Image (cartoon, rainbow, N blue to C red):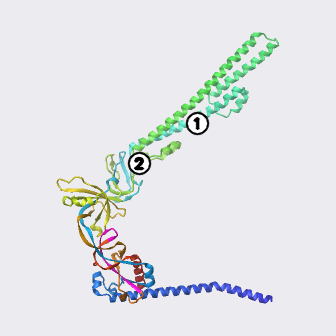
Amino acid sequence: MSVALVGRSGLRSRVLRVFPWLAMILSLALLSVYVATDILGRRRNAEVAATVLQSAPQSKAAVAGQVPAKAANRATTVVLSESKFAASKITTAPARFDELPTELGVPGKIDVNADRQIDIRPSAAGVIREVHVVLGQAVKRGERLVTIDSPDVGTARLNLRARQRELSTARVEADWKSEVAATVALVIPEIRKGTDPSVIGKEFADKPLGAYRGSLLQAYAEFDIAAHEEAKTAGLRSQEVIGEHPAVVARHTREGLEAKLYAVIETVAFDAAQEKRLADQRVRRAESDVIDAAQRLRILGVSENIRDLLEHCDRANALAVDEDVTMYFISAPFDGTVLRRDAVPSQKADSSDVLFTVADLNTVWVTANIGESDVASVPRIRGGSIRMTSTSYGARIFPAKLLSIGALVDAQTRTVPLMAETDNRDGLLKPGMFVRILLDSPTSERVLTVPHSGVVEIKGKSGVFVPQKPSAAGAADHHAFTFRPITMGRETGDRVVVGSGLKEGDVVVASGAYLLKSELILQNQTEED
C-alpha cells in the first residue's frame, strides 16, 4: 500500500511540473492564431482598398489630385469592417459655401519686443578679460556674458575686506567685554553676602575679570582685614586691655573701607556694563561699515551675499590671499538671445559703452501701417486678435494679439500705425522678417468650408477623408474612406476654408478622421511588410 501511495505522489509531482509548460505552449499557440488572423484581416482590407481604387473613376482622382496606387506605391483608401465602423462612431458632413468677410492683406514687419530687450553696459569701467558668448547665442538668466578687470572694483573689494577685518576684531572685543561683565555680575553678589575673599579668589580664578579683579578683590580684602581688626579691638576693649581710642579707630577704619568697597562695587558694575554696551555698539557700527562697503561694490556691478559677509567676516584674511580683487563679470538679466555683441578681449570698456544687446524672443512685436483707405477694417480687430502669414512658412497662420492702433493718420504716408504681439516660443519668426497681416474687410465673399475636426495631415499634406459608395467597398460589410488632399485657407470658428480639392456638396468625415488616419498608416505598414 505504501508503494502505491509513493507511486501516486510521484505521478502527481510529474503532472504539476509539466502543467505550466503545457499552459505556456497553449498561450503561444493562441497568440500565433490571433496575429495570423489580424494580418490576414489587414491584407484583406488592403485588397478591398485596392479594389476601390481600381473601380474609382479617373475624374475623381483628378479632382483629388491623386495618382494611381501602384504609381504612388502607397494606398490612400482605408477600409473598416462593420464592427469597427460602428465602434468608431464616424460622422460625415457636406462641404458648403459660407459668407465670410473678405480678407485684406497688409504688409507688416517682425520687431523685437522692446519691453524684453536690454542694452548691457559695464557698471564699472575697466578692461575686458574674456567674452563668454557669441552673437545669436541663447543665454539663461545669470549666465556669464563677459569678465572685466576694473581698478574701481578692486579698490571697493579691498575696502570691503578691511571692513570685515574690523568687524571681526570688534566682535572679539565685544565677546571679551560680555564675559567680563557677566563675571562681575556674579562676583558682586558674593561680596555682598560676605563670602570669604579666599573662597571668591579660588572660585573665580579661571573666569575673566580684567582690570576689575585687582580693584574689586583688593577693596574687599582691605574691608575684610578692617572688619577683623575691629572685632579684635572690640574684644580687647571689653576686657579693658586697651583703651577706648583704639577701638574707635578700628571701627571708623572699617566703616571707611566698607564705604570704599561699595563705591568700588558700584563703579565696577557700571563700568563693566558700559564697556559691554560700547563694545556692542562698535560691533553694530562695524557691521554697518561692511554693509555699506558691500552696497558700494554692488553699485559697481558686483553682487555680494551680505548675510554671508557678516556671518563669516573672519574669512577676510584667507580670501585676500588668493582673491582676484579687480575681476567682475556681467550676467544675463533674463533668458534671451544675444542680438548684438561689441565686446572684444583686451578692449577698454567705459560705463557708457554698449557691450551686448540681449532680447527675449519668446514674444515678438508685429508692426504695420494701414492705409487710409483700409482704415474701415481696423475697428473689427481693436482689442482682439489678428492673423498673419509669412512667405517663409507658406500658408501657415500665426495668431497675434493686438496691442495698439494709432489715433492719428500720418500726414505724409496717409497710414495708421498698428502694433501687435505674437507668441514665438518655437523661434520661427525672426526680427526684421516681413509678414502679411490679414484683416477682415467690410465686404464679404462666398467660400467653401469643411469642419475643422475633419482635416488631418498625412506626409506633410493636409486633406480630408471622403466616404466611398457601399458598392465600391467590394463587400457589403465593409466601409471605405479615401484620403483626398486639399488646399487649406483660413480658419473661421469650427470650420476651415478650402481653396481646392473639393466642391460644394462633397461629403467628408467630420469626426473620426484621426482614427482613419491611424488605420491608414497601419494598413500601409502591413502592405510594406
Instruction: Indicate left or right for 380 with 425 as reference.
Output: left
Front-most of 315 and 276?
A: 276
Query: Hey, what amino acid is under mark 1?
Result: Asp
Numbered disc total: 2
Helix, strand, or loop for circle 1? helix
Residue at x 52%, y 87% (from the top left corner)? 33
Specify few, some or many for label 2: CA neighbours under 10 Å numbering under 14, 14-19, or 20 or more: many
Query: Hey, what amino acid is under mark 2?
Result: Tyr
Which residue, given by chain and number where applicable, does mark 1 sit on? 175
Q: Position of residue 466 (x, y in %)?
A: 34, 81
Instruction: Indicate left or right for 416 with 144 as reference.
Output: left
Instruction: Indicate left or right for 380 with 526 as reference.
Output: left
Per the rendered image, the range of residues in magenta is 478-495
Front-most of 213 and 189?
A: 189
Specify few, some or many for label 1: CA neighbours under 10 Å numbering under 14, 14-19, or 20 or more: some
Query: If you read the primary sequence from the N terminus, does the residue marked by circle 2 or circle 1 appear first?
Result: 1
Q: Quadrant of the C terminus?
A: bottom left
Residue 493 included in the magenta stretch of the image: yes
Which residue, given by chain and number where applicable, does mark 2 sit on? 328
Residue at x 67%, y 24% (from the top left corner)? 218
Q: Position of residue 47 (x, y in %)?
A: 39, 89
Q: Quadrant of the N terminus?
A: bottom right
Instruction: Indicate left or right for 356 with 298 as reference.
Output: left
